[in-house]
Amino acid sequence: MSIFIKENPILLSRIEETKNYLNSISYFSSEENHEKFNIFIKRMSAHIEKVRSNAKIIQDQIKFPENLYNFTENHDELKFLNPELIPYIDLTMENLKKEISPNYVRNINASPSILHHVINSSHHPEFYHPTKDSLKELGVEKINALSMPDFFIAEMICDWKAMSQELNTNIYVWIKTNVGKRWLFSEKQQELIMQYAKLLDNV
């Protein structure tokens, strides 16, 4: 177990609760599921660690009244709960296979779980879409994120930066590709997105 997990009692407790639940449904009856779970925990822990590291940098500069670094202790908590848990365990394994063999075709439909996650997590633009409860799938309509608060825009940027760190991609390419096209943000929000991203340039 990593030092990061040991030093984060909330995450440690969440992992133990998740293991207990999976034990209760005999999920670990196969060795393959043990391996998938361990990979999921390793990757989620690393992701949360990066998000929190990014959050500390932004919090130190912006000084949000509600501490962003402390808040991100609960980042992506829904992925440890039903109905997202097992689909995200499977998706994590499929993504690993894709990284190892770029020609690998993912053998999973994670769209319902991803949709559930983004419309119920405040660091995703879809959470603020006025008709989010009627969304059947992502990518069909532009998402209205005009009501997304600055605080959660900052957490979103921490998340995007963490993903770019993990995938060795450029956050600014992601912003250019998606902001204003996939998601509707105001001019002020777009300025904040760039401001927060630039605070993480040296990460």
Image (cartoon, rainbow, N blue to C red):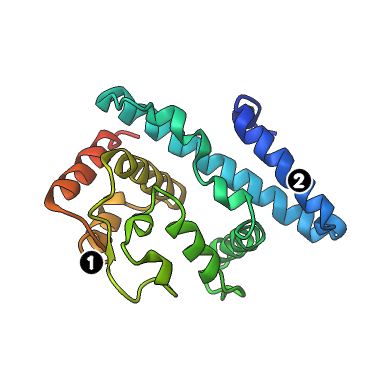
Circle 2 packing at 10 Å, graded few (<14), some (14-19), many (20+), is some
Q: Along the polypeptide, which appears first: circle 2 or circle 1?
A: 2
The one nearer the camera, 173 or 196, is 196
Residue 130 shown left or right of residue 102 in the figure: left
Q: Residue tagged by mark 1?
A: 181
**Image quadrant where residue 16 sits:** top right
Q: Are marks 2 and 1 in contact (CB under 8 Å)?
A: no
Quadrant in which the C terminus appears: top left
Where does the image place residue 36, in percent across and percent down from the top left? Answer: 71, 56
Q: Which mark is residue 52?
A: none
**Image quadrant where residue 151 sits:** top left
Where does the image place residue 108, in percent across and percent down from the top left? Answer: 60, 73
Q: Residue tagged by mark 2?
A: 19
Task: Tell me if residue 80 comes above or below residue 196 in the rendering.
Answer: below
Furthest residue toward left? 187
Task: Tell me if residue 5 comes above or below residue 119 in the rendering.
Answer: above
* Mark 2 residue element: helix
Could you tell me the amino acid type at mark 2?
A: Lys
